[in-house]
Amino acid sequence: MLVDLISGLFIGAGGLFVLIGALGIIRLPDVFSRMQSVSLIETVGAGLLCMGFIVKVGFSLVGLKLILLLTIIFFLGPVVTHAVAQAALAAGVKPLLVHDRRSAATKADAQPVSASVDKIKTPNVKASVKKALPKSGSKKADI
Amino acid sequence: MEILVDAVLLTLLVVITLAILFQRNLFAVVLLAGAYSFLMASIMLVLDAVDVAMTEAAVGAGISTALFLATLYLTHGKEYLQPNFKFQSILVVVLAGGMLIWGMWDMPEFGVMQAPLHENTAPGYLDASKNHLMPPNVVTAVLADYRSFDTLGETTVIFTAGIGVLLILRGRKKPKKSKNKAENSHET
Amino acid sequence: MYLFATIAILIAMCCAVARAVVGPNIFDRMLAANTIGSLAVLLLVCFGFLMGRPEWLDIALTYGLLNTAATLTVLKYYRHGDLSVDADHEKGADDAG
């Protein structure tokens, strides 16, 4: 009974987080902010769901598989989002910022931040993002 | 419940298919095709066709993405519009689709026990596979024993894949030199 | 609760598909496609428990790995314009700068 209650709580919370993440995918304004809601689904949502099922089945082969699945989603999901962010920055997609705090960072954070800013600017895509994206890809592909 | 999941997934499938049709950027088409095959695999699983679902996911999302990308390397990343509208091809497509729908009317209703398949063919196999000392699973018995010459190719493929996996697992120890080289170049 | 989780995942899938269809640039689509894959995995798990068939977890595991592999393949191609590029070399050059 208690097990059912706990697993139900976990699964309900997981479903709630999946819903919040879905709302974020629709409503947030640009790629980099949408990444956060995707990460929400892949870490908190999947984590809580799998946790609930693990509590439900206890120590068994199914539980072991669930732990494996949780490990895969929990660690590989953020890897993929990070790779998407890196590729987007390399292709010249600018994050939507009110003011760019990266250039006016404090001294302690200045070193890695300036390196990342340099990295963004190297592709020097001047045209609008939508136009530039297929172009840069096809240019590379043509060589 | 199953109906609900089926309905939602099939609707999403239709939406993605239309998006693929109207998309001109071929990278986006590759991505949408990957999403399509994941949805399709989910539908197959809901319909209880686990092996087909596995194949769809492995082929649709795994290998064909890589193959499409390898093709895009040779071509441009953008689809050009067809200069003129071909009436004959539309006619052929509509005719073929109409014939398929026409042929569907003769099929027995989905999941009905009185279908000829369940009345004539299946009971024979269900009875015989017990007596012939076949594998305990009837599907496996039909695939691997009754149709063994049909599935000879499949079995060969599976053995080849097994050999490949063994080679990959074994070959990790030998080429240490090249691995060290790669690490050194990474450090510098 | 299983039902609620399954319906939540289905709704999330709808949102992800909408984003994949309208997404203004290619990275939106990439992110949405990856999300659809992850949600398909979660759907398998939830629906498997709902139907009393936890064996589907094996397939969910395969999906999770395939999803990651497919997305990383696309990203690698987009980043380097080629699948057979040696990432270590380029990475070393980038890090030095």
Image (spheres, rainbow, N blue to C red):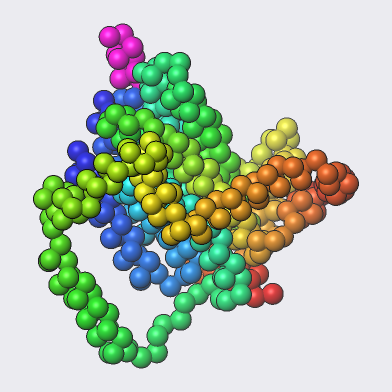
Residue A100, compared with residue A53, is above or below; it is: below
- How many numbered dots are placed on residues in this image? 0
Splitting the image into 4 quarters, where does residue C8 fall? top left
Which residue is nearer to you in this view: B36 or A113?
Answer: B36
- Which quadrant would the C terminus of chain A be assigned to in this image? bottom right
- Give me the residue at 19% from left, 38% from top: B1
Residue stretch in magenta: A1-10
Residue most extreme to the front: B131
- Give me the residue at 36% from left, 18% from top: A56
Give percent across and percent down for residue B165.
65, 46
User: Is any part of residue B74 visible from this angle?
Assistant: yes
- Give me the residue at 40% from left, 44% from top: B140
Left or right placement of residue C75 versus residue B125 in this view: right
Splitting the image into 4 quarters, where does residue B50 fall? top left
Q: Main secondary structure of the magenta part?
A: helix
- Which quadrant would the N terminus of chain A be assigned to in this image? top left
Indicate whether residue A2 is drawn in magenta: yes
- Give me the residue at 63% from left, 44% from top: A102
User: Is any part of residue A135 visible from this angle?
Assistant: no
Give percent across and percent down for residue A80.
55, 45
Splitting the image into 4 quarters, where does residue C75 fall? bottom right
Give percent across and percent down for residue A115.
73, 47
Indicate whether residue A9 is drawn in magenta: yes
